[in-house]
Amino acid sequence: MTRHRSRACVKPGQSELDRITGRVLRWLSIAAALAWLHVLPAAAEDKQTLIWLLRDLPPLTIFEGSQKNLGAVDQLMPLLIASLPQYRHDLLRVNRARGMQMLLEPSFTCDPSLLWNPERAKRMVYSIPAYRIRSNGVAIRRKDHAALSPFLIDNQVDLERLLASKSRKLGVVAERSYGEAVDRILSQAPPGSLTAHYGNDALGSLLQMQRLGRLTSLLGYWPEIRYQALQQGIAPEELEFFGIHGNAKYQSIHVACSDIPEGRQAISAINATIRQLRHNRLIEFYAQWLDPQMRSEYLRDAEDFFQDEAPE
């Protein structure tokens, strides 16, 4: 029986040269695909890294506990990052002093929760307002109401008179900005009228001093004070909060970046994202932390503010 060698099936009109050319083209295609797979990581590595500086500042940012990462700015961060795919993002937890130091260095860093003040604006670049928050005020224990009464005008604290009296020290968080108007008053405070506390848990420590009777009043944001009081085992109902006479009801929170070309470019993109989010989602992110009686008023006022604000 004669055996015949099998031959490869040849299409009509296909020469040996055609088959060789086809193989070469297939191998070139595979080689090109493999080369592209190596290029993708390299392209990702070419992205600049934007370092986000996060401070433990409830209810904007919350680092620990059952409400960890549920703060107003915590909820903003994934939306900001998703809107900036041109960068790699590195989230860095810092204390107040280290955060300010890095923002003033020529590094590509941004802080998503900063108040504007004229000194900072000389060395940083700010976004448009992202949040409207209730301004700082003075908190006391209800049992100490009589001690504060002489300094109340229309149920607001005359902060300058309180400090000038020297009869009661005011607790403050060291190196914090409380807004332009309050910062000016604090800078002119008589010696010995302030008790400044440092550290990551400065407000909690001030609340404990107040609880022990070593401090009558302290300065801060009411939602933050309520949150920290609960962490310290203090019922918020034991406290009273008063706005500062002559101070605006609300303050604006901004994103701020190092004043370098990369920082200025990032702020332009960040502004576009904030404009899309602040009329609904950002307002709600903050409103959830307010007392029910404050919430409806805040929602109305914040919506009016952003509606009236001229486009930038």
Image: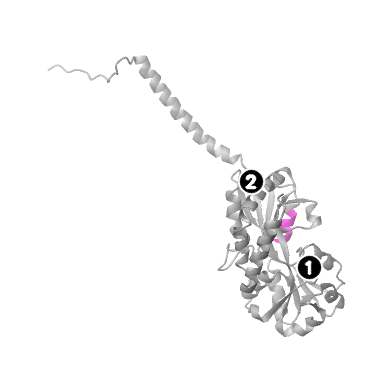
Instruction: Please report the residue visible at 59 percent of the width from the left and 48 percent of the height from the top.
Output: 83
Q: Nearer the viewer, mark 1 or mark 2?
A: 1
Q: Is residue 5 above or below residue 138?
A: above
- For label 1, count other residues whose C-alpha is less than 10 Å away and answer few (under 14), some (14-19) or many (20+): some
- Horizontal and vertical percent position of residue 147: 79, 83
Residue type highlighted by circle 1: Asn
Name the quadrant containing residue 308.
Answer: bottom right
The percent position of residue 74, horizontal first and vertical second, equals 60, 59
Residue type marked 2: Thr
Please say whether residue 215 is visible from this viewpoint.
Answer: no
Q: Which span of residues is magenta-colored?
A: 94-101
Q: Residue at x 84, y 74 (%)?
A: 163
Quadrant location of the N terminus in the rendered image: top left
Taken as a whole, is the magenta stretch helix, strand or loop? helix
Label 1 sits on a secondary structure element that is: loop
Q: Secondary structure at mark 2?
A: strand
Identify the disc placed on residue 49: 2
Q: Name the residue rendered at 67%, 50% in the picture.
A: 271
Q: Is residue 231 above or below residue 54?
A: below
Query: Which of the colour schemes (rainbow, by chain, secondary structure, one colour) is used?
Result: one colour
Answer with left or right where residue 5 lies relative to residue 33: left
Distance from label 1 to label 2 (Cα)? 39 Å
Determine if residue 202 is in view: yes
- Is 303 situated left or right of 120 in this image? left
View extreme (left): residue:
1
Q: Position of residue 286 (x, y in %)?
A: 63, 64
- Name the residue that disc number 1 marks: 247
